[in-house]
Amino acid sequence: MSTAIPSPGERQWAAVAHVVALLLALCTSWVAGVAGMLGAGIVWLVKRDASPFVAAHAREAFNFNFSMFLYAAIATVIAFVLVGATVLTLGLGAILTVPAGLVLALVICAVALMWLVCSLVAASRAWNGQPYRYPFTLRLF
C-alpha cells in the first residue's frame, strides 16, 4: 500500500471497494460471491491508475471475495458428498455424515461471519486511510 496519506476521496473509494463487494455478495447469496468479486473488480478497473491506495484495497477485496467463493464451493462439494454417502449407504452412513454435516454447518457459519466482520473492518480501515490485509485470503490478483 502507498506510504502517502490518501485523500478523503481515495479513502471513500477504497471503503466503497469493500462495501460494494460485501453488498453485492450478500444480495446474490453467500455462495455467489462472484458478484462481490465483480464489485471490487469494477472499483479496481476505474481507480487503478488514479490511486495506488484505492487499487490496493480493491485488489484485496477482490482476492478476499474470490477466496470466500472458493471456500463456499468447497463446502458445497463436501455437503453433496455427505448427502451422497448417506443415500448410498441407505441411511446407515448417517451415523457418520450427520455429525460431519453439523460440523460443516458450523464451519460455514463461521466463514460467513468472518466474511461479514472482515469486510466491515476492511472498509473501516480504508475509511481511516490505513492498509488492511484480509486473513485466509489467496492473493492471486
Image (cartoon, helix red, strand yellow):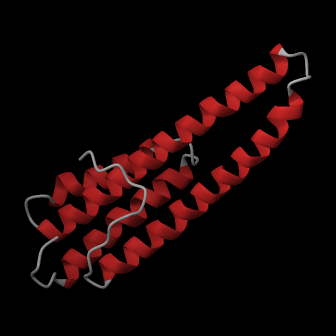
Residue at image point 90% right, 16% down: 90
94 or 69, which lies in front?
Answer: 94
Q: Is residue 50 above or below residue 46?
A: below
53 or 114, which lies in front?
Answer: 114
Q: Quadrant of the N terminus?
A: bottom left
86 or 29, which lies in front?
Answer: 86
Answer with left or right where residue 62 lies relative to residue 78: left
Answer with left or right where residue 50 lies relative to residue 37: left
Measured as percent of width and height from the top left, residue 124 is found at 39, 79
Residue at image point 76% right, 40% down: 100
Measured as percent of width and height from the top left, residue 9 is found at 20, 78
Residue at image point 32% right, 67% down: 133
Measured as percent of width and height from the top left, residue 118 is found at 47, 68
Residue at image point 38% right, 54% down: 137
- Place residue 112 in its image quadrant: bottom right
Q: Is residue 132 above or below residue 22?
A: below
Q: Is residue 33 above or below residue 43?
A: above
Q: Is residue 114 above or below residue 91?
A: below
Measured as percent of width and height from the top left, residue 77 is found at 60, 29
- Place residue 140 in its image quadrant: top left
- Place residue 10 in its image quadrant: bottom left
Residue found farthest to the front: 96
